Amino acid sequence: MTSGLLLIDKAQGWTSHDAVARTRRLAGTRKVGHAGTLDPMATGLLVLGINSSTRLLTYVVGQGKEYLATIRLGQSTTTDDAEGDELTRATAERVAAVTPAAVAAGIADLSGDISQQPSAVSAIKVDGKRAYARVRAGEDVQLPSRPVTVSEFALLSSTRRDGFLDLEVRVECASGTYIRALARDLGAALGVGGHLTALRRTRIGPFRIENAATLEQVDVVADLISPADAATRLLPRLDLSAEQAVDLGHGKRIRIEPDATRTGPVAAIAPDGRLVGLVEYRGDQAKSLLNFPADLPNEPYESESS
């Protein structure tokens, strides 16, 4: 059974669930998952796990991300993006008074380690239910602020049109950062309101959009990143002897050279290049955290409508 990670360039209008469902059909298996939801409005990189490699998605989700986005200043919406209803609109004169220096200062204030209130229509769970579902049900949802890290918030270009100021930006941030919230907060700080009109994810950790394929173009077998390749891009690598690979596969601890710098999971690779599992170091031993046994035959895919 084919296993690995697949990089998909999601089109606008598709949900992450749509992309997973389509990939299940293409791969002929139900065991497909994704790391990091993209809203239907957003495009770009979606990392999918196929079969046993869904276990690696945990280590993808927490990776840093990069986005290209368009922020419209002069209008706020209920969802902090273009899919919501208008809340406020500033006069053209008010927007025209926003200077490049004020924009630069606002961006600087939203860079680095900051406190951010997630959008009410996020996928964060509130008492077991997604925040966006509560909003759609008519509830007033106010999510608490939380610390996030925006390592780079760069202005690429700006355009004044139709009484608005559109900013093309690039954002590099830690997992859990909401670009819609950056647009909202920048507009609020400048006194004119703001929301997101376009969003494209270009990187998750070591995986880049340049290496992704659209769902219309993807070749699941040819484009699959092997479990060993994926794991060693995400985690440190431990090369095993043939005997160590067998022992680790049986759940035994193996002897290693102590390395106090390796405090998290390490990808254990057999001499034939296969990912045996993920281990953690305990002094001069490595203990198995997660084994990757040989894949089993695919579970036949049946569409949800069949």
Image (cartoon, rainbow, N blue to C red):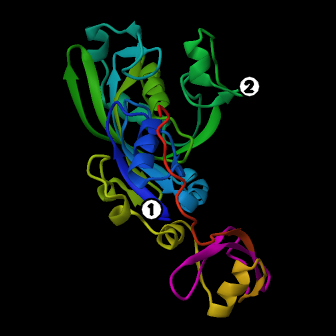
Asked whether residue 267 is in view, the answer is: no
Residue 106 x, y percent position in the rendering: 43, 31
Residue 22 x, y percent position in the rendering: 40, 43
Pick whichever, 3 or 161, lies toward us: 3
Q: Are marks 1 and 2 in contact (CB under 8 Å)?
A: no
Vertical relation: 76 (above or below) 32: above
Span colored in magenta = 258-287
- Label drawn at residue 131: none
Q: Amino acid at mark 2?
A: Asp
Residue 235 quadrant: bottom right
Q: Is residue 289 magenta?
A: no
Q: Amino acid at mark 1?
A: Pro
Q: Is residue 274 magenta?
A: yes
Residue topped by disc 1 = 206
Pick whichever, 48 or 238, lies toward us: 48
Q: Earlier in the sequence, mark 1 or mark 2?
A: 2
Pick whichever, 134 or 118, lies toward us: 134
Residue topped by disc 2 = 127
Residue 9 x, y percent position in the rendering: 33, 47
Determine the residue positioned at 62% across, 87% down.
Answer: 240
Residue that extends furthest to the front in the rendered view of this protein:
306
